[in-house]
């Protein structure tokens, strides 16, 4: 075997190692370049949802001392780790007498280990049965928003609910869209926040979900465009601001 033939495999192996090291260095550099350094929460004004919610809007008025009936989104020991803020309100309609329970759970830093816990998981942990689950497009003047409708029960208590999740500047449905939203903000240099909005009613009425959609539309409509974006993100292109 000639000397050049002997060293050829060694040169090829060295080149392969050099390319691998270069790729690793490039990946590390890209990871550092795209590492989020700012919070999206700061970009949108560090929302304080307790103060953003109106005491009354349309025919709805806050029901005093009724928040205890609102199911906590997760067990108490997990609240501090997952959420920056939780708000529970109950509103009664002055014309119909129907009461809606509103729960907000906000996480300032939605990294992969601090995901918002949706009612699909949380209600069963509180002793509820989920009898029915449907994905639903919540129709609003600001675009269609992906939401989920659950029909739950605990004993004789029937509680239909609607929930939606804002992640960063969009309302998302499911893990993949939320991860894509997280990646989109990370490329822009931001750590994603997240808001879980849930409205429910203790009722057997067939129009429960319809009334919840009306309630949410009236709530969002009562907010200024700037504050509304803190609930549902940016309006879809071509929709009202």
Image: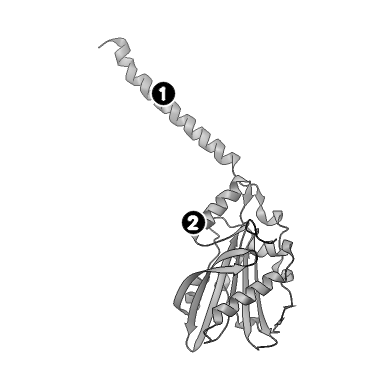
Front one among 151 and 193: 151
Q: Where residue 101 appears, x then y in whole percent? A: 62, 79
Give the alpha-carbon distance from disc 1 to disc 2, as whole Å.
38 Å
Q: Where residue 131 appears, x then y in whole percent? A: 44, 79
In the picture provided, is 141 more to the left or to the right than 29? right
Total residue callouts: 2
Q: Where residue 212 appears, x then y in whole percent? A: 59, 77
In the picture provided, is 75 more to the left or to the right than 5? right
Can you tell which mark lies on residue 176? 2
Q: Element at badge 2?
A: helix
Question: Toward which corner of the image does residue 5 lie, by quadrant?
Answer: top left
Q: Please tell me which residue is depicted at 55% across the width and 74% down the height of the picture.
A: 162
Front one among 235 and 32: 235
Q: Determine crowd level at label 2: few under 14, some 14-19, many 20+ residues with C-alpha closer than 10 A.
A: few
Above/below status of 105 relative to 132: above
- The answer to which of marks 1 and 2 sits earlier in the sequence is 1
Q: Residue furthest top?
A: 2
- Discs 1/2, front: 2
Kindly identify which residue carries mark 1.
Answer: 15
In the picture provided, is 76 more to the left or to the right than 46? left
Q: Please tell me which residue is depicted at 59% across the width and 75% down the height of the picture.
A: 213
Above/below status of 89 relative to 95: above
Q: Please tell me which residue is depicted at 73% across the width and 61% down the height of the picture.
A: 226
């Amino acid at each position: 075997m000639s000397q050049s033939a002997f060293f050829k495999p060694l040169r090829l192996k060295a080149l392969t190692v050099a390319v691998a090291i270069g790729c690793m260095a490039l990946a590390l550099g890209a990871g550092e370049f795209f590492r989020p350094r700012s919070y999206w929460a700061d970009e949108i004004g560090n929302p304080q949802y307790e103060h953003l919610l109106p005491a009354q809007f349309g025919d709805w008025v806050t029901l005093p001392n009724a928040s205890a009936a609102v199911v906590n989104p997760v067990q108490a020991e997990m609240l501090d780790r997952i959420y920056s803020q939780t708000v529970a309100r109950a509103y009664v309609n002055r014309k119909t007498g129907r009461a809606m329970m509103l729960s907000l759970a906000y996480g300032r830093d939605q990294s992969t280990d601090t995901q918002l816990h949706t009612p699909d998981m949380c209600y069963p942990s509180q002793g509820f049965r989920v009898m029915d689950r449907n994905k639903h497009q919540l129709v609003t003047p600001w675009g269609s928003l992906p939401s989920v409708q659950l029909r739950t029960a605990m004993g004789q208590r029937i509680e239909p609910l609607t929930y939606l999740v804002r992640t960063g500047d969009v309302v998302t449905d499911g893990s993949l869209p939320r991860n894509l939203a997280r990646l989109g903000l990370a490329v822009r240099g931001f750590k994603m926040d997240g808001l879980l909005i849930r409205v429910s009613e203790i009722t057997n009425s067939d129009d429960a979900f319809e009334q919840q959609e009306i309630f949410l539309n009236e709530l969002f409509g009562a907010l200024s465009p700037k504050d509304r974006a803190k609930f549902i993100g940016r309006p879809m292109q071509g929709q009202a601001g």
